[in-house]
Image: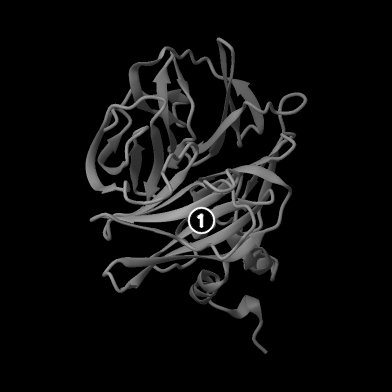
């Protein structure tokens, strides 16, 4: 009788590729051989779950629990010739109550509701708890996750502002400890960052806020330093809505909606280095004719470069507590997207599953 250990390596890899993301933990516990494969970096780096090119995977929070969602850009057009979009739930990620989730290379950094600790999670069922040096984390703390490009070891950045005081700390997975970074900045970060190729990018502004407008800053987890000021493809200030996103883990994207105006613009990078960035405009849409105004105080968006379609999550104008998705497309098309749920949805981020073992 054939057992699990008798299956070829190629067949096991193909089986795991077809396993539902939310069932990877169970697959890992099937036998000792499979559990060992999940710890093999050569296997996990090249073995992700398969997904359709027309689907974008999201992590969304509802009731302080993370849910795995699939955003589908339909190939079929509607009667007006525009692309249709749907969002459906794939599974629930059952862990402690969280209020924020940040994605980096298959890992999810989760901030617990009580700010007592951080949880790093991946779909293979592997988790890691990160505790503060003393007491709890502060409600004003900001976090980012990335990795050293020399050895692919993950790190967590923590920073917080106390009046004129700014402090930066980093948690190294290898040493399993926090240490203070000797970093001095004359600018502040006030928007959520996004991770791309091991680094995290932020929208920042000078201490005098609107003196020189907003700009891009990259935190390099290899050197553990912020890079130089990088230009955005426009001039903006704090009242404008500026949101960062990624394009399939390959490019950076930025959305601009100026305060009091109706035009939405989205740009993507054509070249992105630590010391240089070049932008190209992807689409512009005027939403003046639509009843619900866009403001995006803390929103997020996901874009399909080929179809020139963006799905934007914005605060509901009816409840002011949950997010609602809308789709915009080059040529002026704008429509709501049905989540098929009446419960409150909160923060969300894109997600690309990779079976990366947590050190």
Identify the residue shown where x is 39% and y is 46%.
246
Is 168 located above or below residue 31 in the figure?
above
Looking at the rendered image, the quarter that the N terminus falls into is bottom right
Q: Position of residue 131 (x, y in %)?
A: 72, 33
Check disc 1 and report the residue beneath it: 58
Q: Quadrant of residue 30?
A: bottom right
Left or right, residue 109 beside residue 115: left
Identify the residue shown where x is 59% and y is 60%.
38
Q: Position of residue 79 (x, y in %)?
A: 30, 74
Left or right, residue 350 beside residue 134: left
Q: Quadrant of residue 341?
A: bottom right
Q: Position of residue 298 (x, y in %)?
A: 50, 38
Looking at the rendered image, the quarter that the C terminus falls into is top right
Is 3 located above or below residue 183 in the figure?
below
Q: Position of residue 326 (x, y in %)?
A: 42, 55
Identify the residue shown where x is 65% and y is 61%.
92
Residue 198 in view: no
Is 179 located above or below residue 29 in the figure?
above
336 or 304, nearer to the observer: 336
10 or 329, nearer to the observer: 329
117 or 74, nearer to the observer: 74
């Amino acid at each position: 009788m054939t057992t699990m250990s008798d299956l070829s390596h190629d067949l096991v890899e193909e089986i795991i590729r077809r396993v539902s993301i939310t069932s990877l933990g169970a697959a890992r516990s099937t036998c000792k051989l499979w559990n060992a494969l999940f710890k093999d970096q050569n296997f996990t780096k090249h073995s992700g779950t398969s997904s359709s090119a027309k689907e974008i995977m999201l992590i969304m929070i509802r009731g302080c629990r993370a849910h795995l969602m699939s955003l589908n850009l339909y190939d079929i057009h509607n009667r007006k010739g525009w692309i249709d979009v749907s969002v459906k739930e794939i599974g629930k990620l059952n862990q402690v109550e969280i209020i924020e989730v940040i994605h980096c290379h298959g890992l999810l950094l989760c901030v617990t509701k009580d700010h007592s600790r951080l949880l790093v999670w991946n779909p293979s069922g592997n988790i890691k708890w990160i505790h503060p040096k003393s007491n709890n984390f502060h409600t004003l703390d900001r976090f980012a996750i990335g990795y050293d490009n020399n050895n692919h070891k993950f790190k967590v950045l923590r920073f917080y502002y106390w009046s004129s005081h700014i402090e930066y700390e980093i948690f190294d997975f290898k040493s399993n400890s926090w240490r203070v970074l000797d970093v001095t900045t004359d600018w502040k970060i006030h928007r959520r960052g996004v991770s791309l190729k091991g680094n995290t990018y932020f929208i920042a502004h000078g201490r005098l806020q609107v003196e020189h407008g907003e700009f891009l800053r990259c935190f390099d987890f290899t050197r553990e330093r912020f890079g130089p000021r990088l230009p955005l493809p426009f001039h903006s200030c704090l009242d404008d809505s500026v949101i960062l996103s990624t394009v399939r883990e390959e490019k950076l994207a930025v959305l601009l909606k100026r305060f009091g105006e109706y035009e939405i613009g989205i740009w993507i990078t054509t070249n992105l280095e630590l010391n240089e960035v070049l932008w190209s405009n992807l689409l512009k849409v005027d939403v003046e004719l639509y009843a619900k105004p866009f403001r995006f105080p803390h929103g997020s968006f996901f874009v399909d470069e080929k179809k020139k379609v963006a799905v934007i999550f914005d605060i509901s104008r009816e409840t002011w507590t949950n997010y609602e998705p809308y789709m915009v497309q080059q040529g002026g098309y704008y429509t709501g997207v049905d989540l098929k749920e009446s419960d409150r949805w909160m923060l969300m981020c894109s997600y690309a599953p990779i079976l990366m073992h947590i050190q």
